[in-house]
Amino acid sequence: MSNMTPDVRLRLGWAEAAVFALEQCELTHANAICTAWLEAVETGGPRHDPFGTLYADARYWALAAPPHELVAYTLTGMERAPKALLPLPFRKNVFKALWRGFPDAERAAFLKAVTKGGRA
């Protein structure tokens, strides 16, 4: 640590204090704090990774996977990722992808079923 600048030493001290503070919290509170921070500094997710491999690999696998595997992995992934770990923007993307797959008549029937008089 002797060759670090004062600014780096200060920031390292803050990081150590943050870790200590999180360790004193209940796990659910620490998870919520970390998730909120990650959402605040989010860069738009892996769609912007420099090599584009995450979504490209997922698309390639999805094209080759049989329907039962797609359903099994998708549902299991959604169950395993509670809303504290799957931020609202990601959940909205999942919902939009599902919604686009419904025919217009099914969309209208769904809206009518979940709203008063079909008004959202």
Image (tube, grey):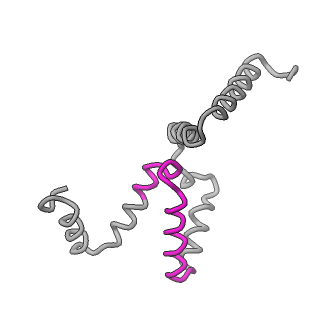
As drawn, the residue found furthest toward the top would be 6
Quadrant including the N terminus: top right
- Indicate yes or no whether the magenta region holds residue 73: yes
At x 54%, y 44%, the residue is 43
At x 64%, y 32%, the residue is 24
Q: Position of residue 66 (x, y in %)?
A: 54, 83
Q: Which residues are magenta?
A: 65-93
As drawn, the residue found furthest toward the left would be 117
21 vs 58, nearest the viewer: 21
Main SS of the magenta part reads helix
Note whether 47 is above or below 32 in the view shown. below
Quadrant including the C terminus: bottom left
Q: Position of residue 64 (x, y in %)?
A: 57, 80
In the rendered view, does 34 fall on the left or right side of 71? right
At x 58%, y 66%, the residue is 56
At x 60%, y 52%, the residue is 49
